[in-house]
Amino acid sequence: MNLNIDIYSDGAVLKDMLAMKEKGIVSGFTTNPTLMKQAGIKNYMSFAKEVLENIEDMPISFEVFSDDFGIMEQEALKLSSLGKNVYVKIPITNTLGQTSIPLIKKLSEKGLKLNVTAIMTEKQVQDTVSAFHTDTNNIVSVFAGRIADTGIDPEPLMKKALELCREKAGTKLLWASSREVYNIMQAEKLGVDIITATPAILNKLSMYHMDLDKLSLETVKMFNRDIKDLGFSILD
């Protein structure tokens, strides 16, 4: 594969993160509270520090946990201090629907690298990009997969989001909540800067442009193996 887009691994299992790094197919990492819950993480800071001890040369996004903007700010400063490769993830709103833009602006003025997450509208993109201070590096994470889950094509928004991100130097657009390998192809075609995907999706990159006759046969063989494991008989 020869792609221009940067591929990040999305997860909170250190073993998987290191495996993706060793394969040489990713150039960064993202995490979030849901993935941490799934991974059974018990101590956030211990997890973050362990990750950073093993991955020093690639960008890694860690998300704030509080729903209070004042505490979010403190968390963001603490997370940012863990390493130069840390991007602090800030949700575009809190759970009350109150905008995070004032906080984003404040943190950006302090020079933090930010990854603004859970974005799904053009206005959210526009407000976020406008809030970034000049001469800072930031990521705008648009949840294209969740948008597609509603039956809406995310590509028009991603095209507009890319235009908006290009207006502010140091701002990169990230295709978030990927659902399949084809999302990588979609993002690449649009010129999106980054796509993040789970190790389960990234492991399927070995199937890229696989011969479909071969894939068809492998699928039939898979069914046959499962039939044997079930031990059922239709004619008995």
Image (cartoon, rainbow, N blue to C red):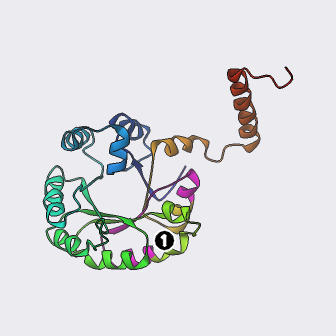
Q: Position of residue 102 (x, y in %)?
A: 21, 75
Q: Going by the image, does 41 lie left or right of 118?
A: left
Residue closer to the observer: 212 or 36 = 36
Which residue occupies the foreground of this view, 154 or 36?
A: 36
- Picture quadrant where residue 215 is located: top right
One can see residue 166 in this view:
no
Q: Tell me the SS state at disc 1.
A: helix
Q: Which of the two residues, 100 or 203, is positioned nearer the viewer here?
A: 100
Residue type marked 1: Met
Quarter of the rendering containing residue 99: bottom left
Q: Position of residue 232 (x, y in %)?
A: 75, 23
- Vertical side of 197 occupied by 193: above or below: below
Q: Assess whether residue 175 is covered by the magenta stretch.
A: yes
Identify the residue at image location x=57%, y=40%.
Answer: 206
Q: Is residue 84 magenta?
A: no
Q: Which residues are magenta?
A: 161-185
